[in-house]
Amino acid sequence: MGADVGTSLFGPWGQDPWRGLALASGLVLAPLLSGVINRVKAKVAGRRGQPMLQLYYDLAKLRRKGAVYSQTTTWVFRLVPVLGLAAATMALLLVPAGTSPAAGRFAGDLFLFAYCLGLMRLGTVLGALDTGSAFAGMGASREVQFAAVAEPALLLAWATLARLTGSLSLSGMAAGLAEARSEVAGAVPVIVLVGVALFIVTLAENCRVPFDDPNTHLELTMVHEAMVLDYSGPDLAAVLYGAALKLWILGAVVVDLAVAAWGWHGTAGAAAFALGMLLLAALIGLVESVMARLSLLRVPRLLVAAGALSLLAFSLTLRSGW
């Protein structure tokens, strides 16, 4: 069930015209998700809000500016934006669009995907520590603390999908979910549990409410923003674009789960994937509109809850002998 969709990184495109949809759309439309989220929050609050293309304008403006570096920073600080952007692009290359395989997929690409996400975090933390700022170090400490709880939940969710579909490839999981849903009794509750867990982890990994507020600059509550305050110009543009890609990447994994579970293929699957990304951004905007940011002591509890959902889903697969 759910055999891996390919064995080489850049294999033949086959007969699927939508292969690489996640890559092409992610590179172009990733900053748009932020605009949709902000517009939904503005509408809920009764405000007009900023333009949906605001992040595109910001990136273009930052590209025209010069970068300023502190005398305490080294080459590590300058390398981090490029490293993070490269890792995000590589991870995006492995993400399918619904049931359409990713542009670059191979058996076991799940492990490379996980390492790309870890490399992005490692680079951001090292860049923050390289500034020698206690403020940036505080944000780095919080980032690592939350990641220590979020990563097990993410890995358990992927382990559940791998056991359910018999694949260690993201594309293979997407292709096998529809078959699992129709053939394995009780697979729907497992898929729902994994979906909720992945959504919670997506909010945490992208520093969204209720875990963090990307719009705040309150020193006592900042996490991600505290680590990137020292970047400017093209470096800041690379950091912001990399963050937008990360939101698209993890959001696409959640949407892929829904699209594949419903068994949409071809043009219908591509349309469902695009609509799903917009709905996911709107959902994040609604969550940020109705919820306040959790205190730092309560953040790990919600991440533990996500881990518990993933563990429960994995236990159900073991109990059922799938």
Image (spheres, grey):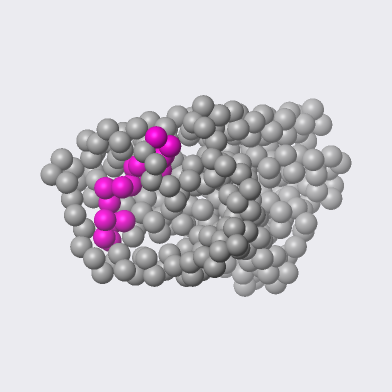
Q: Which of 14 and 88 is in front in this view?
A: 88
- Considering every residue shown, the one lying at the far left of the view is 71
Residue at (78, 47) in percent of width and height: 180
Q: Which of 163 and 15 is in front in this view?
A: 163
Identify the image quadrant of the C terminus.
top right
Q: Give the range drawn in magenta.
A: 220-236
Whether the magenta-drawn stretch holds residue 225 is answered as: yes
Q: Quadrant of residue 65?
A: bottom left
Instruction: Give whichever of 137, 160 is nearer the camera.
Output: 137
The image quadrant that residue 313 belongs to is top right
Residue at image location 63% in from the left, 53% down from the top: 286
Residue at image point 36% right, 38% down: 219
Tell me the residue at 55%/36% (across/down): 294
| Residue 228 located within the stretch drawn in magenta | yes
Is residue 252 visible to us here?
Answer: no
The answer to whether residue 63 is visible is: yes
